[in-house]
């Protein structure tokens, strides 16, 4: 991606949207280099959409149950994203797997609450706890055709504490995750990057 003055972000969410909020807050500073032009979701009635509305950011919702099949879901989601001409799409707690044609149309970043390639999928925090690792963390990566398999941009470790349950560990991960996501998106949009095989090269 070639950096431009203010990059256009479309952020997709499925829940609380605290990572979205961190991006919205960062974008309030013009020096950050990006603005959130739309927030999309795969469900109604979530705090993530409320956060967008409070920030005067347009929203869209494409629900799988409203579509004839996954093809239509992907088509409608892609059309909704494309209408905002994003430079970067950020999956921030978005819990649907999108078809390759959707994630390949625009550079698409995902934040995942584990140190990939360990614990991909929708239950990363519970899986890490169940495995008994003493260190887990967060990964910000580009999305490819697989599930949590794309090139890694940034990772940060989080210690698992004795007595952690999923909620406690996830909260500590999310505190680290919000900072890493803001830092990583900022660097990508301001400085540009290139992808060489599995390596994301930042200047
Ligand atoms: C985040 O921890 C994100 O990594 C995770 O959902 C949380 C959303 O929090 N995403 C996944 O597990 C995707 N597989 P938020 O809604 O408060 O930003």
Image (cartoon, helix red, strand yellow):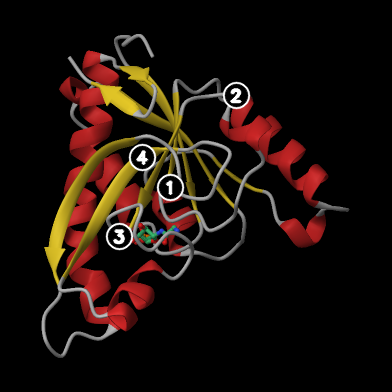
Q: Nearer the viewer, residue 76 or 170?
A: 170
| The residue carrying mark 4 has its beta carbon less than 8 Å from ligand 1 | no
| The residue carrying mark 2 has its beta carbon less than 8 Å from ligand 1 | no
Quarter of the picture for ligand 1? bottom left
Secondary structure of the residue carrying numbered label 1? helix
Nearer to us of marks 3 and 2 is: 3
Position of 29 relative to 137 (above/below)? above
Measure the C-alpha gap from mark 3 to mark 2. Answer: 26 Å
Position of 119 relative to 32 (above/below)? below
Which quadrant holds residue 18?
Answer: bottom left
Could you tell which of marks 1 and 2 lies nearer the N-terminus?
1
Q: Quadrant of the N terminus?
A: top left
* The label number, if any, that marks residue 126 in the structure image: none
Could you tell which of marks 3 and 4 lies nearer the N-terminus?
3
x then y, percent, for residue 163:
15, 90
x then y, percent, for residue 189:
29, 21
Could you tell which of marks 1 and 4 lies nearer the N-terminus?
1
Does the residue at mark 3 contact the one at mark 4 (Cβ under 8 Å)?
Answer: no
Secondary structure of the residue carrying numbered label 3? loop
| Residue labelled with disc 2 | 105
Position of 103 relative to 106 (above/below)? below
Does the residue at mark 1 contact the one at mark 4 (Cβ under 8 Å)?
Answer: no
Q: Nearer the viewer, residue 126 or 8?
A: 126
Measure the C-alpha gap from mark 2 to mark 4. Answer: 16 Å
Could you tell which of marks 3 and 1 lies nearer the N-terminus?
1
| The residue carrying mark 3 has its beta carbon less than 8 Å from ligand 1 | no
| Residue labelled with disc 4 | 141
Secondary structure of the residue carrying numbered label 4? strand
Q: Nearer the viewer, residue 16 or 92?
A: 92
x then y, percent, for residue 110:
41, 44
């Amino acid at each position: 991606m070639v950096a431009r003055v203010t990059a256009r972000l479309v952020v997709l969410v499925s829940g609380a949207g605290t990572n979205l909020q961190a991006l919205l807050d960062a974008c309030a500073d013009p020096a950050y280099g990006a603005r959130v032009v739309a927030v999309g979701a795969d469900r109604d009635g979530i705090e993530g959409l409320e956060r967008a509305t409070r920030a005067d950011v347009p929203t869209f919702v494409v629900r799988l149950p409203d579509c004839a099949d996954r093809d239509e879901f992907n088509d409608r989601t892609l059309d909704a994203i494309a209408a905002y001409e994003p430079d970067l799409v950020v999956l921030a707690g978005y819990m649907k797997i999108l078809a390759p044609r959707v994630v390949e149309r625009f550079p698409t970043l995902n934040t995942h609450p584990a140190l990939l390639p360990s614990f991909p999928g929708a239950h990363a925090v519970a899986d890490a706890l169940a495995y008994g690792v003493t260190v887990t963390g967060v990964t910000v990566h580009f999305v490819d055709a697989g599930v949590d398999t794309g090139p890694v941009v940034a990772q940060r470790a989080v210690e698992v504490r004795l007595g952690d349950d999923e909620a406690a560990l996830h909260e500590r991960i999310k505190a680290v995750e919000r900072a890493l996501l803001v830092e990583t998106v900022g660097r990508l949009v301001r400085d540009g990057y290139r992808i060489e095989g599995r390596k994301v090269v930042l200047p």
